[in-house]
Amino acid sequence: MSNLISISQMVKWTEKQLKLLHESYSHFQASYLKNLIGKSAQAIRKKASRLKLKKSNGYRYKNLINQIPLKKYSGKNNFSSFISGFVAGEGTFLKTKNKIRFKFAIALADDDSKILEDVKKFFGVGNVQYYPPRNKKWKGSVCYSVGDIPNLVKVIIPFFDKFSFFTTKKQYQYNVWKDKLIKHISI
């Protein structure tokens, strides 16, 4: 047993692992980062201490991410995968410029409102709003959105971290949005 401990302590950190540690340690608990970095929570805390990395002032908000069990989605993998693919095509992650607000939204024609009602029921958060047509030739529209930060952090981010997108464009949009949101709440 002592041989295993000494061997595991000798394993060096890769540049990628160190970069992830520097970028993420101030935002997330070590127990959350262990799967991302590939080291134990104890090793992450030790390395962060040696590098003198600190938690951000808004760290208490990041703990919200760890409060939602990802097992909640495990029995619904087919619908979870559907939502991930559906959002890749129809969804968006928004950050307003003037007033700093963050929003996750899916907009469709009003005759597809059942899908958005199911998405709302699945997540258990957000609103579905109906909008009249802007032109006589057009259909009305319906939009599912989540705009309050606690629900974005507790529900939306963990979901899309677990069920990532198959398209790189939407994954990039999500990652940029998530980074801005995390930076905003840590100010």
Image: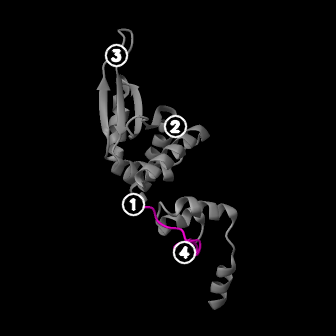
> Which residue type does callout 3 highlight?
Pro
For discs 4 and 2, the disc positioned in front in the rendered view:
4
The part of the image, by quadrant, that contains residue 15 is bottom right
Q: CA distance from mark 4 to mark 3?
A: 57 Å
The part of the image, by quadrant, that contains residue 70 is bottom left
Image quadrant occupied by the C terminus: bottom left
What residue is pinned by disc 3? 133
Query: Residue 86 in the image: x percent, y percent?
Result: 48, 36
Lower position in the chain sequence, tag 3 or tag 1: 1
> Which residue type does callout 1 highlight?
Pro
Tag of residue 88: 2
Residue at point 53% right, 76% down? 42
Residue at point 44% right, 37% down? 94
Left or right, residue 32 beside residue 1: left
> Which residue type does callout 2 highlight?
Ala
For discs 4 and 3, the disc positioned in front in the rendered view:
4
* Magenta-tinted stretch: 40-65
What residue is pinned by disc 4? 49
Q: CA distance from mark 2 to mark 3?
A: 25 Å
Left or right, residue 53 beside residue 106: right
What residue is pinned by disc 1? 69
Q: Residues within 10 Å of mark 3 (few under 14, many from 20)?
A: few
For discs 3 and 1, the disc positioned in front in the rendered view:
3
Disc 4 is placed on an element classified as: helix
